[in-house]
Image (spheres, rainbow, N blue to C red):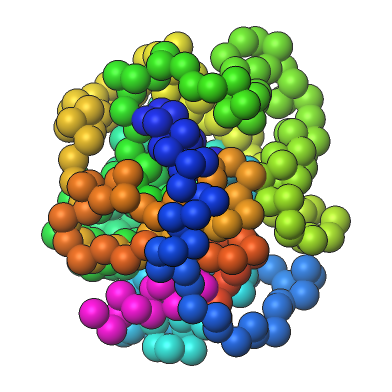
Amino acid sequence: MSDSVDRRRRLILGAALSGVASKAFAQAEPVARAVRAPSSTRLEPLRHVDAGVLNIAYYEAGPADGPVVILLHGFPYDIHSYVDVAPQLATRGCRVILPYLRGFGATRFRDPATLRSGEQAAIGADVIALMDALGVTRAILAGHNWAGRAACVAAALWPERCAGLVSVNSYLIQDLSRAMAPIGPQYEMALWYEYYFQIERGRAGLAADRRGIARILWDQWSPDWDFDDATFDRTARAHDNPDYVDVVIHSYRHRFGQAAGDERYAGLQRRLASLPPISASAVTLDGDADGVLPASDGRASAAKFTGRRVHRVVPGAGHNLPQEAPEAFAAAVIDLLKA
């Protein structure tokens, strides 16, 4: 989920803005609704590449010599968040790459001894390691939820590698120094799973019923999304990864200071502590039916984008915006290609 620690202020501001200001800001223009792929469609075949500490499983579409777009999924989702976005970009001539994050799908750690870290520095570094392994110099990075954060981290720390950024819920780099700053109880309530995962009962619960927890989160985060069981099951298979529980638990414990990070990313994490700005051209998106973060006009994070930045509110979209509103997400990428 796009649950950066510093969102606690953004949640309160977003709630105030979502009723009036966000509607007066840049709502996404209506786009023609394309035919949705059936829930039986799977993004296959997968390719594999050794990239840093991982062997990354990924799907690729479009011409090999096209501008590269890397579409990054979040928790508890998978690459099928982009099942209707990828074809739209491929037909526009893009080389579209959809990797499974660490702990998801067929992606595996290369060394059994590697810490199963889910910290923000690690998932951002994974993006650059993938680009290096595939010989990709620059790419448009597009993501939501955890991987929106990964895209923001990569764009901020390796600006020369980022040709443009699409991020759902704006600037997602976590301010770990404010991890224990409380917010209003109406917002804390929505974060029940973050607190649940801090204790061993939560780890045991996730291990025992990862699909049950994911299904509850899907329903809560996208209250207007009418997905069927087959759509959920297609994604839930990716959560059967043997490292899923460890990576998820570490991610949520690390952001609250309850787990140490992987030393190999300590230098990157120190750089992230300054909340570095993003200089690449960016399109940020909020869904106005997001059950996690209320839609805003984007002003709260404006200072973190030093390049050209457009913020849009997408009507009817919840937290899994690329799968719920693929035309709007694809349009954001296409706008960056034109820039």
Residue 276 visible in the snapshot: yes
Front one among 322 and 209: 322
Task: Give the image location of residue 21, x and y in percent.
Answer: 44, 55
Splitting the image into 4 quarters, where does residue 326 fall? bottom right
Q: Residue at point 43% right, 88% down?
A: 92
Q: Is 108 placed left or right of 339 in the picture?
A: right
Q: Is residue 207 left or right of residue 325?
A: right
Image-based side of 77 in relation to 70, left or right: right
Q: Residue at x 32, y 44 (%)?
A: 300
Q: Position of residue 197 (x, y in %)?
A: 61, 20
Q: Is residue 253 left or right of residue 245?
A: left
Q: Does the segment drawn in magenta span residue 186?
A: no
Residue at image location 60% in from the left, 50% down from the top? 290
Span of residues in magenta: 328-339
In which quadrant will I find the C terminus? bottom left
Q: Is residue 332 magenta?
A: yes
